[in-house]
Image (cartoon, coloured by chain):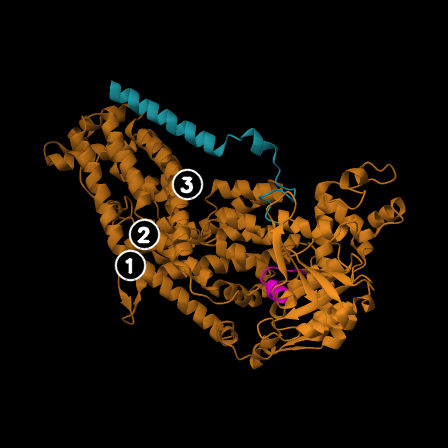
Amino acid sequence: MPKQINVALIGNPNTGKTSVFNHLTGLNQQVGNYPGITVEKKEGICKLPRGLKAHILDLPGTYSLNASSLDENIVIELLLNKNDKDYPDVAVVVSDVENLKRNLLLFTQIKDLGIPTILVINMADRMERKGISLDVELMEKRLQTKIALVSARKKTGIEELKELIINHRQISTEPCVNASSIAPDYFDRLRKAFPNQSLYKLWLVITQDVNFGNLNRNSLENTPDFQTKKKSDLKRLQQKETIVRYQFINGVLKETFKKDVAAAKDLRSRLDRILTHQVWGYVIFFGILLLIFQAIYDWSSYPMDLIDSTFAFLGEWTKDALPSGVFTNLISEGIIPGLGGIVIFIPQIAFLFLFISLLEESGYMSRVVFLMDRVMRRFGLSGKSVVPLVSGTACAIPAVMATRNIEDWKERLITILVVPFTTCSARLPVYLIIIALVIPNERVLGIFNLQGLTLMLLYLLGFGMSVFSAWVLNKILKIKSKTYFVIEMPDYKLPLFKNVGINVVEKTKSFVFGAGKIILAISIILWVLASYGPTDEFDRAEEIVSEQYGETLSSEEFENHVASVKLENSYIGMMGKGIEPIVRPLGYDWKIGIAIVSSFAAREVFVGTLATIYSVGSDEEKTIKDRMAAETNPILGGPLFNFASGISLLLFYAFAMQCMSTLAIVKRETNSWKWPALQLVAMSGIAYVAALAAFQLLK
Amino acid sequence: MIQEILVLVTFLIAVGFLLKKFFWKSPQKATDTGSACGKSDCGCH
């Protein structure tokens, strides 16, 4: 045995690897850089019993041997290069007792390279508090290794680790996972082409682009006997390797690792017991939701009123300050009301994202995902679908993209198809204005704001519809599948207010600027279409009103009637009249019909459109809400926005697929027009039927 | 007359913006099918 043993200390970040290194080396440490790069190289000498010494190299933290950064690459380059002076005689993989499953992925990969590998299970002092029990002997047998239970904090287990390092030659170098099982045909060809090489090392050379003695990826690809695969195929095989490894790890942990949650005594475990409880978990979650929606309404009403009246004043002021003419009218009646229709919702959107960020930052959101997994499974989805569904409350586009971490195609497809039902921030302006118009601002039981409760019900309706549609799709789609759900629960912590602030500002900014440009453009087009008309009636509006009413009208009434005749005979009026028969049974007039059509591009355009249409030809300083409240139903009489038509509109927007960008992203993610077309037809159909039923029952 | 021209120009800019936003595909995006894993935005990393 040589006098000095080369030891590589490897592990996931935050496993206490450096603490173990400090205990092993004491003050005998050197810190430098790896040649040519700025990654820190820490090495030291550990004095072992019987006069032996170990050279300990503390390698950069890495989650696996699938490198994605420069410092992770260093680990692989060292482990593959036997000629490196630091090539380890023994590898020590440091793991955290609370995250063994994730940590063992790296362990199995290193062991499969044929290097004697010791497993250090750190933070062993926490086991009792966390209710964890380990069958170390059986685990050693299953992993074919030696295990040291260490507490770097309490300095226990270090001497046992030193003994294991001395006796490293007794550790089996048999692999944990048979590499051939990942792709038998491919590995057979690999074995035939390179009979003297380790299969797993070859696999890493192919997938990681690192050197392995005289072999590198280029030389492998140029070998005549061996045809490698496309990058995308190799990526898929890498994913398969990870799944195979986790299947092995799950099997080992099932036999050797027990966590009795009821026996755990620490604060986190106690909180987890309550927050993920089968009954109390849901009660607390819905309580928090209730609080959020109440606060959104109560806190944001003052800034909203201020913004609304400011824009109304601004429209009037522009008209007075600029020279009179059509362009001034375009600014005061088209652009300013259109923009006001989006800016007014900034306070509520900011409050919503403030609460969502606080829940995410505190670590509670992961508990919600875990909690909802139980519900989701009954409807053919997994807990992983919760993340896209929760993201969908901001926007369906990132939510659809977030489904990429769902391995199973059927679950992923179903999640993509149902995500647009969740209430995205673009629906919020529509909901808020309609609720303000048709739901009384009253308290229920003296505590709950009725408008806040309605908004919460709409969020739950969207979520419920997603889950119900998933259940239906799960029955209809004949795709075989099997999947599993893994989530790491972060520790509870006080939210970092800087992070929360940045998140709120970024989300609100992207909503305002992303939607704002579209709304501005549509407002301009709508104003032009509403201010010009092709027919004789449009030009003769004054004459028509004079003939109809004579001298009986005040000048204000006369102007209002002229504006009304002009609007009806404008381009947009004629288009609106064309689609009126379709929207009339839902309780809408042609103006709402136009707003629905224009908001097909993006839902939030609805309010801006109505604000623009109702402002054309009007000289009064009125808020958007006032103008909408003053509209009367031309056939039934009474307010146009009443309880029946309001609920009908809310349901229409809850279910309708009014977002071109979402359709485009679904096409990209599914690589087919079939699924977005299905989404568009089905969601529009459901929206129409629900809105029709609501109006006909409530009118 | 100037105001009429300004309205026409503003209208054309608005129409152009919406057409570009929803119907014009950039050459880079047009070739990206998005199906391959391994790109920085593929969601696997």
Query: Which one is nearer the viewer's eye here, A448 or A58?
Result: A58
Tell me what hue chain B is rendered in: cyan
Query: Which one is nearer the viewer's eye here, A200 or A82?
Result: A82
Give me the chain letter of mark 1: A
Q: Position of residue B10 (x, y in %)?
A: 33, 26
| Element on which disc 1 rests | helix
Q: How much space separates mark 1 and mark 3, taking CA atoms? A: 25 Å
Q: Disc 2 marks which amino acid?
A: Pro
- Quarter of the image with the N terminus of chain A is bottom right
Query: Which one is nearer the viewer's eye here, A482 or A61?
Result: A61
| Element on which disc 3 rests | helix
| Element on which disc 2 rests | helix
Q: Position of residue A97 (x, y in %)?
A: 63, 70
| Earlier residue among tags 3 and 2 | 2
- Left or right: where does residue A506 sit relative to residue A266? left
Q: How much space separates mark 1 and mark 2, taking CA atoms? A: 9 Å
Circle 1 sits on which residue?
A299
Q: Is residue A20 magenta?
A: yes
Tell me what hue chain A is rendered in: orange
Residue occupying the point 75% across, 57% down? A88
Residue contact at pointers 1 and 2, CB within 8 angstroms:
yes
Label annotation for residue A514? 3
Q: Disc 3 marks which amino acid?
A: Gly
- On the same chain: label 3 and label 2? yes
User: Does residue A157 sit above or below A590 in this rendering?
Assistant: below
| Earlier residue among tags 1 and 2 | 1
Give me the chain letter of mark 2: A
- On the same chain: label 1 and label 3? yes
Label annotation for residue A347? 2
